[in-house]
Image (cartoon, rainbow, N blue to C red):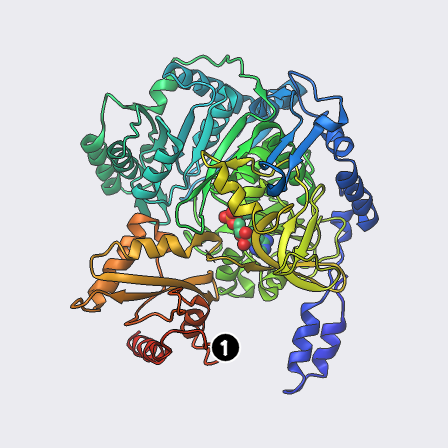
Amino acid sequence: MQSRMGAILCNLCNEENIFIFIAVAMSDVYSPPERVAVESHCRGMETYKAMYKESVEEPHKFWGRIAEQFFWKKPLPTDLNDFMKYNFNVTEGPIKIEWMSGAQTNICYNALDRNVENGLGDRVAFYWVGNNPEDKGQITYSELLADVCKFSNALENIGVKKGDRVAIYMPMITELVVAMLACARIGAVHSIVFGGYSADSLATRICDAGAKILISADGVYRGTKMIKLLEIAVSAMEKSAEQGQEVTHHVCVSHIPRITGSDAEQQKNEETIARVWNDKRDLWWHEVMRDSSTEHECAWMDAEDPLFMLYTSGSTGKPKGVLHSTAGYLLYAATTFKYSFDHQPANDVYWCTADIGWITGHSYVTYGPLLNAATSVLFEGTPFHPTHKRCWEIVNEYRVSKFYTAPTAIRALMKFGDDQTKDYDLSCLKVLGTVGEPINPEAWQWYHKIVGNSQCSISDTYWQTETGGHIITPLPGATPTKPGSACFPFFGVVPEILDEEGKVIEGEGEGYIVFKQPWPGIMRTVYGDHDRFEKTYFSKFPGYYMSGDGAKRDKDGYIWITGRIDDMLNCSGHLMSTAQIESVLVEHPDVAESAVVPIPHNIKGEALYCFVTLNQNAEFTQELVTKLRNMIREKIAPFASPDFIQEAPGLPKTRSGKIMRRVLKKIANDDKDLGDISTMADSSVVDVLVEKRREMMEKK
Ligand code: PRX
């Protein structure tokens, strides 16, 4: 039950003690609701503590028991020391992480064949829900297996082999799941690029991965807008060819003709196809599938063989291909899914709104749910189309019991008021998850009360592309939650909080969150650049994996993620590096220099604020601002579009020429207290920037 302390204090509130009230209300503790706890895989904190202890002290026992539930072509290592081998200390040699080496398995086999063999072939794997409410479908485990086998054969027919990288650029349709599982089945490494990325971003990723195969679709609707994916894919293939990386085969799903849309858009789609299609390179999905066999013997993969790579922003600007391997990822995606959402295979309907193009979609739309034989909703659309009630309509219609979304979506929905859910029966909901960025207590409480009717557990799951799955998260039937805290470590995860000098902070305190030993799902390397892997994550604090986030531990041991401590920003749950944006801005001939900082945004979490210094004789105009904004949309993605671009005749720099972002952040936030500026080479730039900001805001 919720602590009543806050409510009692509320009655005592007056102007002066309102802050005391807020502070106390924020530390409310919510016990797991009985209806969730009663069926939990991990009921009560004592159970959690016992399981956690075993998971970190005897990982081979804990994970070995879980591993036995899956199929192994070659058995798990019997020597305990072979179960998990690692070096986290750069000063003692190369960073290395190995789990269950010597064993062989296939994740697709475990996600599909194993479930079908267990008699679950007729179970629905996905209810597909289209952008337009009239478009819907479903696919069972047997049907999914048949399609995956067919596509595996098709990929092999076009020459794809074990270890080859396959780029995927698709909307949220079942073929995307089929494509990734088929890659996993034949041992090819999939590299999925979110369908909102631009041609340039896709090309960079195709080149870095050395992908010769691309799988895409003709297009998709986002709300009322048609996105011409094929056109973007073709442009990306041309750009990658210019950089020496030829895509030899491109398989495209014909999606637009089978969904609801306007005749005009249909016509446009046909025209695009006629214009860009290249018979030598492009193949239709339905044609390669037509005569393909539904029988396919999967490739047996060594435990540490790569499974997929997924690009994430790097603070130098160049994206990093985070590489995950087979067996460890399998165990971790399956186990985190089961426990963080308390998955009940017989009666749950689960829905994660994330796009498969992000890690959340990899682990918690595809792999985690399928490895648990779950029935899920696969949603192509947005929460706001045709109206902001779309999520509640879907929850109601499919009787969704576990729902997983991002704080940015919750905050955007909150704006539409508290009665938006009242026409829907949401009593089916039991666990509400959030991911991607810190959730503010107000949004947490709204989610809990308005969506969950105060009857659900909230799982604020903290993790990263690099971690493969949740690392700090409450468990729905065990953890008393505090709004805004991701609570405690998942099984196998050993966090520490360090100060700037690398000293461990015991008890209450704030610093860098780091991790002492590997869990099965942690990344193994940066594709093609192990050195960058070691430098980024292991060099600042030898002996630890450093996530790049700050965190504080409260007096009760709860962990609160405070956000990035490097030059990254998190806009609507999309992690971006400031360097990545800056390098696009300086590509414009008028721009000499730029600096990008995050500013708080009440829906997106953080928004981008750019300072640009122009070359002599160049003029800062609205036209230039629009041009710069469009360049970012084109070179990176529309979601990276800045909220503010301000002229900066000079940037605040130290005497050694380093840009003082701390000061820029304050200026962008209109914070008059600039802190210590004694190291600034020329402090007069500050007044100019403050004045330019004022001018810009007045014009807005
Ligand atoms: O800063 C943290 C934030 O998102 C970053 C990871 O981003 P990405 O690799 O794109 O993966 C997003 C989905 C897992 C983290 O370094 N982050 C993610 N979840 C949370 C979070 N910050 C606070 N609370 C969370 N629950």
Give the x, y percent position of residue 435.
Answer: 57, 51
Regarding residue 373, the answer to whether it shows in the image is: no
Give the x, y percent position of residue 497.
Answer: 67, 56
What residue is shown with label 1? 675
Residue 194 in the figure: left or right of residue 327: left
Residue 323 in the figure: left or right of residue 369: left
Mark 1 residue CB less than 8 A from any atom of ligand 1: no
Q: In the depicted view, which residue is nearer to us: 300 or 273?
A: 300
Regarding residue 274, the answer to whether it shows in the image is: yes
The amino acid at mark 1 is Gly
Give the x, y percent position of residue 698.
Answer: 31, 79
Residue at the spot 28% in from the left edge and 66% down from the top edge: 613
Image quarter of the N terminus: bottom right
Residue at the spot 58% in from the left edge and 36% down from the top edge: 94
Mark 1 Cα shell of 10 Å, populated few (<14), some (14-19), many (≥20): few
Q: In the depicted view, which residue is nearer to us: 468 or 18?
A: 468
Q: In the depicted view, which residue is nearer to us: 584 or 199?
A: 584
| Kind of element beneath mark 1 | loop
The image quadrant of residue 206 is top left
Residue at the spot 39% in from the left edge and 36% down from the top edge: 170
The image quadrant of residue 348 is top right
Residue 167 in the figure: left or right of residue 97: left
Residue 319 in the figure: left or right of residue 616: right
Give the x, y percent position of residue 466.
Answer: 55, 42
Residue 646 sits above or below residue 179 on the image: below
